[in-house]
Image (spheres, rainbow, N blue to C red):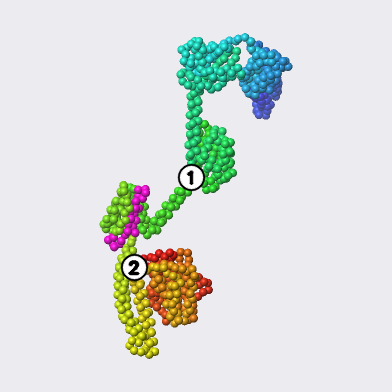
Amino acid sequence: MIGRSAAGRALPLLLTSTALTAWSAPAVAAGMGGTLATASPWLALGAAAAAAAWMLGERRARLAQAAASAAEARAEQAAGSAARARAEAHSLRVLLGAGADCALIWLRPGDAADCFGVQEEARAGWLGAAGAREVDLAVAALRGGQENIERGLTSADGRAFRIVGRTLNGAGVVMVHPLPAGERPADREMLAGLTAVLHAAPAPAWLRAADGALTYVNPAFVAAVGAASAEEARAQGLDLLDSKARAAAASAERGSGAFQGRVRAVARGRRRQLDVVEVAGPFGIAGLAVDATDVEAARAETARTVAAHRRTLDQLTTAVAIFGADERLVFHNAAYERLFDFSPAFLDQRPSDGQILDNLRTRRKVPEQADFPAWRAQLREAYRALEPVNDWWHLPGGEMLRVVITPNAEGGVTYLFDDLSEHVALESRYNTLIRIQGETLDALAEAVAVFGSDGRLHLYNEAFLSLWTLDAQALGDKPHIDAVAALCRSRHGESAAFSRIRSVVTAMEHREAQTLRLERADGRVLDGTAQPLPDGGTLVTFRDVTDSVKVERALIERAEALEAADKLKNAFVSHVSYHLRTPLNTLMGYADMLREGMAGPLNTRQRDYLDHMRLSSDQLRALIDDILDLASIDAGAMELDLTEVDVGEMLESVAEAAHDQLETARVRLVMAVPRDAGRFTADPKRVRQILFNLLTNAIAASPEGGTVTLGAERRPQALSLTVSDEGPGVPPELAETLFERFESRNSNPRHRGVGLGLAIVRSFMTLHGGSVSVVPAATRQPGARGTLATCVFPLPGTSHQEAA
């Protein structure tokens, strides 16, 4: 049709162009003959007329074609109406053939349902209100997308119906069929099928008449009760249930018509647990028993396994949390609860994974995230992963958690949290200690080397390299002790010390420390040790003691010289003192004889000379006595003559002995002796000597007109005797050497002694087990001048029988 129309349009154009050409031909063919020039206009007019006639015919053809198209559309519409009519007729024939009393049909999704048979207004009276509602629900279900519906319906008067519905491409039909009252072939087929299934089932099944007699048993029942056949089981009335279970079943059947419970029974000669179902009805009593022994055993074993796993997981330090496929918490152990400080009530609610993460974020128990929702969504990808996901959580509090998220076969995940904070801290401290150890070893003056249990050098410091003139390159590959010994011998000569060190390094049992000293060929002296370590290694140290040895040898030589000098001094003192005493006694005897006039009368000057001689002799004898006492104390030969000493009488005797010195120095003596001073155990001669020496020093230190106080004080477990003066006191720089021998510190040149008095006082006090101190008087009485000397005797007195 398209070709024909194109041709129709082309032909008039061709004819028109021909006419125009002919019309203009005279001008072109002016040179032609006259005949042709005369015929040209008529030819053009004829061509134009032909073209007009053709165009009119073409228009008529198009009008006829449009009329034909409209007729075809009307024919198609009529054919569709006819098809729909035929479909409706076919549906009606189907309904009539199926025996439906009522049918609802719609051909398009939006069409209203046409009702055939019982109309809508009579449907409630026919089926009842509930039945009519069931029909409407079936129509709504099919319109909602359900393809097939088949359900039973009982009318108000007890009649049985079946509702059947089908839908296809938006069209649908719902039919209501009445069910016959009598037996149907389908019932017979269903009974045969159920019988075949029960016959092949492993679960015992039975049917009893109303009087309790068995009417049917399957092979599983026969095997369970131990009968030879079904006829034997029915004839003997065998039963799986005991009397108690049978009574409970009968009671339940009389009440609700059915019994269901788990009972213990003997099946196939063994105790089993059976899930029994019995239903009573017009057919009698039908029963089925399913063996649940294995299921119950498996459940119990599973429960025990789960409980054991829970107890095991609760003992782990690794936190475990298991989430199900619904992303809710299924299980957690105690470590998980402790690690994140969860409330047990919160975890008992089985929170979701997201709720737990939100809770942890609120309490800052998860890593800080710039986009927390995206991070949480990334974690949830583990529910769709195939491989475990490993992650590290750096918590704001400084904790370090290693997180492993493992997908479960059921669709959930298992979280494992290892708190590695302490491990990381320990590792950091360990690395720090290793670095500190290396720095410390390098800073040590001692040479240190550590050999492993394999006898190879594992650690050394710079001092070791320097001491043995080694280089780090030679020791870089952990040489054996033998190789190290060979390197040292090649540089410093043969030494047996390394053999002893090797015996400690390579010993397997009875490893004992070795201490050794070696002198190298270059004159250096080394002290070495080989100390076994707990890990099987050996710590070897070398210390250069060359200077110490030299000093030690010099000190030994000096000590020996001092000891010889001391012996010489003691021998000199002992001999000279005795040899001095003899002529001194002779001199003092002759002086006394002259003083008494045995050689004739004396004038005043002679008597003064004898008095000075006598005084000097007394001082010389006192000095010799002090030297002898010190020599006896140094030799350990002095012993105390202990007795009861009255404190008051002792102080009075000392004051009387110093009377002449007090008058000569014009110093006043004050006695401060309490009445309860009592008695104490001591050597009276030595106590008198102690107090006399202290009193002599106090008189010598006191200014003219000053006061010296001699006192006593009884303390708990001690007796204190004191001597104080009003002199200038002892300078602080002399306090430490106050009791040294031959150290005279009296500023008065008239009373300067040889410096043995305080040394003797200290020695005698030590023999008595007491102590002596000389301090400024201001320490006891603020504002006071002078010096305070205090002797403390223990009570009860226990003397020391050894020299000071």
Q: Nearer the viewer, residue 664 or 486?
A: 664
Q: Is the magenta stretch mostly helix, strand or loop?
A: strand
For numbered disc 1, what is the local secondary structure? loop
Residue ID at (49%, 40%): 318
Q: Can residue 720 be seen in this view?
A: yes
Residue 214 percent across, percent down from the top left: 53, 12
**Callout 1, which amino acid?**
Leu
In the visual, does 285 lie left or right of 662?
A: right
Q: Which of 719 and 266 is in front in this view?
A: 719
Q: Mark 1 points at which residue?
A: 420
Residue ID at (47%, 13%): 227
Q: Is residue 188 above or below residue 493?
A: above
Residue ID at (44%, 79%): 659
Q: What is the magenta range?
A: 519-543
For numbered disc 2, what is the local secondary structure? loop
Label placed on residue 623: none
**Callout 2, which amino acid?**
Gly
Residue ranking furthest to the left: 494
Q: In which quarter of the image is the C terminus?
A: bottom left
**Tag 2 and tag 1, C-beta contact below 8 Å:** no
Q: Mark 2 points at which residue?
A: 636
Q: Does the magenta stretch include residue 528?
A: yes
